[in-house]
Image: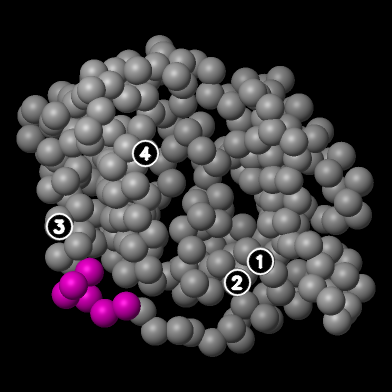
Amino acid sequence: MNRCMYDKIRQTLVEVENNNDINILYAAESGSRGWGFESLDSDYDCRFIYINSKEFYLSIDEGKDYIELPVDKVYDVNGWDLKKALKAIRKSNPTVIEWLNSPIVYIEKEDFKKEIIELCNEYFDETLTIYHYLHIARKKLDEVRDEQSSKLKKYFYILRPLFACCWVMDNKSIPPMEFEPLYKNMELSIQQKEEIDRLLDLKKVSNESELIPRSEVIIAYSEALIIACEQYLKNNRKGSNKDSDKLNKFFIKCLERK
């Protein structure tokens, strides 16, 4: 990653802390750069988890639990309050779990990442995770299915979540954020692999707006994977709710550290 951009993002996060009187516990890159298939002009999607003062949480009114900075062509920076992030982990929400598994980390306080990843594993629910990724893949596939040309990146917004579903079905564990290990986990025909490799190579030298002709290979393959995921969900129960005891203890521990 470009060192200058890395330093600029870290400086932005320091300013966010000072301007909002918060403590950022963790910050990482999300989006295509975190997934490992960014385009030439991909923006930087920084996501962070922060904690407020004790007084903030003692109010009878619920305070704002997120911070968003104005988005431009280069930066997309926003974050969640720790309580919001822990509620998402309780539901095995892959969004925040992906942030925590990002290969590009801007800030990590003490043992925060190690401890919260343990909680992610504790509250991981394979069926909820598959439902999340399958919803994304279906939506993106609908956007390209009947089009003669579509943005190149949309094909990866279909493949990556489907590969994440397959990882969960195969390994019964949290899927990696990065595309490469998800890709390596798949059993592909020669034709499918050649088409995915072709699109990967093209994406590395293209802009975000790059249009490509309809890929029958990817569409047919994606439809087959969706059917396999749907069948798996039919045969597996939706996870049961877990209590919040461990999450509450972790939240209090982080609050006492501040």
Callout 2: SS: helix
Q: Amino acid at mark 2?
A: Lys
Residue 87: mark in rendering? 2
Quadrant (top left, top right, bottom left, bottom right) of the N terminus: top right
Residue in front for this viewpoint, 14 or 78 = 78
Callout 4: SS: helix
The span from disc 2 to disc 3 (Cα, nearest Å) is 30 Å
Residue 182: mark in rendering? none
Residue receiving disc 1: 84
Residue receiving disc 3: 228
Above or below 201: residue 60: below
Residue receiving disc 4: 157
Label 4 crowding class (10 Å Cα cut-off): few <14, some 14-19, many 20+?
some
In the picture, measured across the screen, residue 190 lies left or right of residue 84, that is left
Q: Amino acid at mark 3?
A: Ala
Residue 63: quarter of image: bottom right
Residue 84: quarter of image: bottom right
Please tell me which of labels 3 and 4 falls first in the chain.
4
* Callouts 2 and 1 close, C-beta under 8 Å: yes
